[in-house]
Amino acid sequence: MASNKTLLVTILVTVVLSGIWYWAEKNDYFQTAYQYVSPSEQEIFHWQEDDSAELLIERYRQHFKDNSYSFPRQKVTKIKLYRNTPFISGLSGKTLKQEYVDTLIRFCNDTANYTWDETTWEESESEYYFRLYNKQNKIFGKIFICTDGCYMIKSIPFTPRMKFGGLSEKGVNDMRNLINDKTKWE
């Protein structure tokens, strides 16, 4: 009887600790330094009651060249790529070689890589995610990406340059090439 109780407690503790670890890993709880835009600045890009799609698109376009909305708003020193697999993704990352870091940042800020397609996906549906690190080794940016079928992308912190988060054909091809080119990864 005591061994069953010990087994049950061990399983329960393992499940609770795994859940806490997963939550902390998913939210980068111990190592973040995001620079979000203010709530009033973000409100500009949310659908308003009287908006048409054209009006919302125009509000995005007005801020394409505004560097206060550029991505990721800090100097990037390292980028890591992870498969978006619960529990094990944080253990299986690969690091982008330093000479390609600026290439990925330019990709993120180039509006030609995105379309105005409506996005209806969640971050959990992404195939991959990138973590961007600063010189203090803090995570200050994330990019969730789906290149197999849904062609969506989402950045944290937000940038209007990614339009509504749909990847253009050029964007999908460039991202696939980057992810799959083993010579660009350590």
Image (spheres, rainbow, N blue to C red):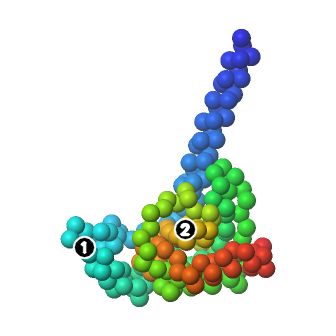
| Crowd class of label 1 (few under 14; some 14 to 19; many from 20; radius 10 Å) | few
Quarter occupied by the C terminus:
bottom right
**Residue type pointed to by label 2:** Cys
| Crowd class of label 2 (few under 14; some 14 to 19; many from 20; radius 10 Å) | some
Q: Nearer the viewer, residue 171 or 59?
A: 171
Cα separation, mark 2 vs mark 1, equals 26 Å
Quarter occupied by the N terminus:
top right
Give the residue number, with chain letter if any, for mark 1.
51
Q: Nearer the viewer, residue 129 or 132?
A: 129
Residue drawn at x 62%, y 63% is 127
Q: Are marks 2 and 1 in contact (CB under 8 Å)?
A: no
Give the residue number, with chain letter if any, for mark 2.
150
Please provide percent x and percent y for residue 113. Answer: 53, 83
Q: Nearer the viewer, residue 53 or 22?
A: 53
From this view, report whether residue 46 is shown above or below residue 170: above
**Residue sitting at the far top:** 1
Please provide percent x and percent y for residue 98. Answer: 70, 80
Residue drawn at x 69%, y 80% is 177
Residue drawn at x 69%, y 74% is 179
Residue drawn at x 55%, y 71% is 151
